[in-house]
Image: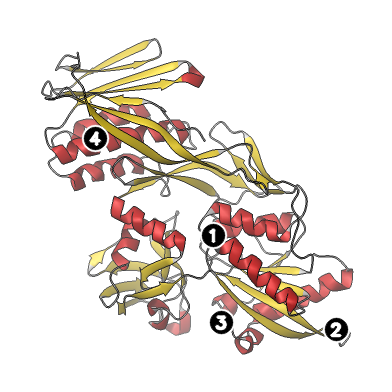
Amino acid sequence: MEPLCPNMDLKPASFPPISVRFVKPISLSLHSHRFSCSDRRVAKKWRVSVVHANSEAKFSSQELVRTIGKGLLSFAAAVAANYAVVCCNYPAMAESLTVAFPASRTTEVNSVQTTLVETWGLIRETFVDPTFNHQDWDQKLQQTMTEMFPLRSADAAYMKISGMLSTLGDPFTRIISPKEYQSFRIGSNGNLQGVGLFINTEPRTGHLVVLSCVEGGPAARAGIHQGDELVEINGEKVDGIDTEVAVQKLRGRVGTTVTVKVHRGNDIGGDSGIKEVKLPREYIKLSPISTATIPHKTPDGRLTKTGYVKLSAFSQTAAADMETAINEMLRQGVHSYILDLRNNPGGLVKAGLDVAQIWLDGDETLVNTIDREGNLLPINMVNGHAITHDPLVVLVNEGSASASEILAGALHDNCRATLVGHRTFGKGKIQSVTELHDGSALFVTVAKYLSPALHDIDLVGIAPDVQCTTEMLNSPNSVSSSLEADSCVLVAEHELDIQESKGTAS
């Protein structure tokens, strides 16, 4: 996806004036030798260089001038005669945009003003809703810049950006600080120090809910469960705060502790209400794959082996780790598989697409995206070759979200797997992540997605083919004895027998 304003000049009329040029960002293409996605590109990072300039901004101290194409709009602002000017060019649209605004005399706020313009521009160019939640997005920039001008701290200025983004009505479009972005990258790489909680914002309520706990981690040992609502972190209420902000508060140096309050989302054992626990921070190993081999007796009396694969998150290593696991199981004589996506909150979309290709052949559609113009853009494999064609069942539940739903939909709609469990979370939106000039990052919802069979997922989820009983919502261990007591696994094994009796993979 091409970014807004590949070349952007920022020229404050301070002394000396400064010119900031935003160079075309490095882009990460989702096109690979294994799948294609209609040449969609995701902006990865803005590169910024700062040089001194001698020109002065020629604008009245009583107005800000914005030029869009041939149109001219000016609006009054009672500010000092210290302006910044941003010029954007849109070659594909033959459109130009010039924005003049009062430059703050507070250095750190002035830097955030630059971040504000970057944020506004990327939203203007890429946000999935072209009406911006039925508001004038250019007017919103004017309003936010006016509110930011008198501030004296960067934190207060960033709050104004967050406030502007909140008006879009999309909890997944947000800005995070440089420190929070580093934590996000660490989590995607699979290494962190924290308490082993996966949380997300429930879009209907705005509350932070627990999607899953890392098995054996501090949160799991303390009895926190999927579905619990996070109420406080170290005495600070978290209602309404951004997910990444909460994650940053939970993470920290190994050996320290964090106190959390949770509201039991499910009446587990009659223990509903508020629970407060002190959690030690530890090294959390986020190896996304755990496996087991389950002895299985078929209806005709044959002894076979079923491979069980638990995928806990879609990190950068997820596909490679799964490929290694499946190849090892093939060497052990496994002839059917259970892929467990229960309580998997998602992660990198590309990782989900890569995992799907381990199980699929040909030029199958993996997912369909819908851009802001309403165009349907399928993402297809290119000459795919599955590692195995043996029968496959996928386990899902309410904690299966985002990339988990993309993977489950791809395998189900392409008739490769039977889904067993409960209806999934229902997050049918895709975000791009762009690193801004100051090291912060902007998450923007750039597309909606539908399953290969064009089923809407957002706020709806994916219904399984076969349901399990409610007591099977807890994630099983990777030990065979525990799996044998998991009713959902038993149902999955029955479905595998049905597939084998039909002589087909699904």
Observer able to see residue 459 = no
The residue to which callout 3 is attached is 477
Are the two marked residues, 4 and 2, in contact with CB atoms closer than 8 angstroms?
no
Q: Quadrant of residue 325?
A: bottom right
Q: How many marks?
A: 4
Q: Nearer the viewer, mark 4 or mark 2?
A: 4
SS category of the residue bearing label 3: loop
Q: Amino acid at mark 4?
A: Gln
The residue to which callout 4 is attached is 113
SS category of the residue bearing label 1: loop
418 or 20: which is nearer to us? Answer: 20
Q: Amino acid at mark 2?
A: Pro
Q: Amino acid at mark 3?
A: Asn
Residue at mark 1 to residue at mark 4: CA–CA distance: 35 Å
**Label 1 neighbour load within 10 Å: few <14, some 14-19, many 20+:** many
SS category of the residue bearing label 2: loop
219 or 210: which is nearer to us? Answer: 219
376 or 201: which is nearer to us? Answer: 376
